[in-house]
Image (spheres, helix red, strand yellow):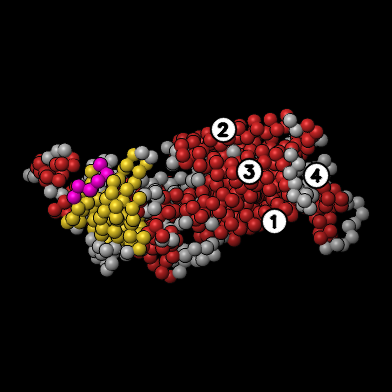
Amino acid sequence: MKIKSDSFRIAEYAAFLLIMLATLVLCVCVGSVNIPVKDTLTAIWNTIFSLPVPEGISQPIIIFVRLPQVLCVALIGAALSLCGCAMQGLLRNPLADGSTLGVSSGASLGAVLAIAFGITIPGIPFAGTMVMATLFAFCSLVLILALAYKLDYSLSTNTIILIGVVFSMFANSVMSLIITFAGEKVRTIMFWSMGSLSGSSYTYALILLGALILFGTFIFYNARELNAFAIGEDNARNIGVNVKRVKLTIMIAVSGLIGVCVSIGGTIGFVGLVMPHMTRMIIGPNHKKLLPLTLISGATFLMLADLVARVLLRPLELPIGVVTSFVGSVVFVYIFYIMRKAK
Amino acid sequence: MMLEVRNLTVRYGSLTIVRDISFGVTPEQWLMVVGPNGAGKSTIVSAISQGIPYAGTILFQDRDIAKFKPPQLARNIGFLTQSHSVGYSFTVEEIVKLGRYAYSSGIFRTTDKEDDDKIEAALEITGMKPFRKQSVLTLSGGELQRTFLAQLLAQDPKLLVLDEPTNHLDLVYQKQMFELIRQWIKDTGRAVISVVHDLNLAKTYGTNAVLLDKGAIVSGGPTGDVLNAENLEAVYSMDVYGWMRAMLKQWEK
């Protein structure tokens, strides 16, 4: 009798990982100057093991420009998809995502406030923006869910999306107001809010990795609980899940991740909507598998989106959010349509 | 006393849904909670499951269940709710397996022999074994209800609280389900509370009954005493006994 194997299948993980690694190499190779795969791999390999890099390979481009940017993009994609996946399970709602719920806008508002009023934490660059973004992400999430519960206890899709849209507009209007009065800070804010990841450094990548490990662990630890929530909150309570604790844990983890991602990369919409959905179509809704595989596929998706943004109108570079929102809005309408038809 | 509800009052805003009611259930009893629509039957179930705020005390084996940790409550009391709609395509087996949640926590814990046995038995007894790998989105209402009953049996609580358990079931499965619960209750230290609309089922299977009207208890005690002609006529404002006999005539040859 087989019961054990259904939560772990090596072949699936290997396939997802391979595609991600291939994408990573591709994204480092292709750009304003195309670099052969062999040269790229040699440069990375030799730099890691501090070997001399052969003549003719542009090590600086690969190691100090492309690689950190691709790594940051991959980590943000992984983090945002994981957040989307966790929220879609928690709220039993396949359209939940940082951008549709308004959490990303909330985080942006926090970041803009931090920049405009020069809120910093001495000694750690960037920490002020990050903390403010995280804090605002969490407060927005609490506010949005409290409102949703008050208006419609069953948390139906329509209510949540409606409140998310309204909250986003509210946050954006406050942001515009701040930017109007920001004076000489306007340039910094505009530069940040474009959501460009070019000029990323390994410091950012490390911060993202740290956040992903820290908050990701909390989310992974609650995989079974998320399954129960995805079936229904009442059912979760009936089988003995500590409903309040799990909700709070997931909300804190999600806000933390979105806050860090937004403060580094700006708002990149719909990432958390597309990949969890597609991954779920391939491997099913069980979060023990869905969470890790969504993390991998999310990284792959955002790297590809970044590639398209860099290459499509070369030498012009599009903001990455343009690509994700384009794909995301189509997928959003598709999911909504499918849900309607299922009723 | 296995479960004791003392002076339970539930309010939604200024509206009082359940007013100061008390009742209890002892082992091997099957308590039927009956009454017309809006009497507050489901609200009582929600209160016991700790899903809504309430005033008063609910004791399980003389301890306040509000102080139970969620897994501890789930190991003692299991609930079957009225309507199920699952949004994602979980398999029957995945849902039934979650019934064992209260016996373990954490991500790395694998199922042990006892879990497997309980899951298998639950699938077998509810007739859901052929559906185990099937997505719940493809099931009929009755099959879905049986899936959650299987989850409940895998959870193996001492007290079952069922809210309209036969809501989506056809006659064959209604009978099967009630016979199944009648067997289940025979094990020592088990009891059932169920909310039912069908007075026939209440009379046939219940050992005890609580008759509710507008959030208050009209009568409580052994089923036969509670469901007498005067009580039912007062609550339902119609001659229930006469109506039931007239219905039965349709089936006589």
Q: Is residue B217 magenta?
A: yes
Q: Are marks 3 and 1 in contact (CB under 8 Å)?
A: no
- The magenta stretch is B214-219
Mark closer to the chain start, 3 or 1: 3
**Closest to the observer: B159 or B210?**
B210
Mark closer to the chain start, 3 or 2: 3
Q: Residues within 10 Å of mark 1 (few under 14, many from 20)?
A: few
Residue holding disc 3: A136
Residue holding disc 4: A199
**Would you say A277 lies left or right of A122 here?**
left
Q: Is residue B71 magenta?
A: no
Instruction: Please tell me whether mark 4 or mark 3 is closer to you in this view.
Output: 3
Residue holding disc 2: A166
Residues flagged by tags 3 and 1 on a common chain: yes
| Element class at badge 2 | helix
Q: CA distance from mark 1 to mark 2?
A: 32 Å
The kind of residue tagged 4 is Gly
Question: Please, which chain is the residue tagged with disc 4 on?
Answer: A
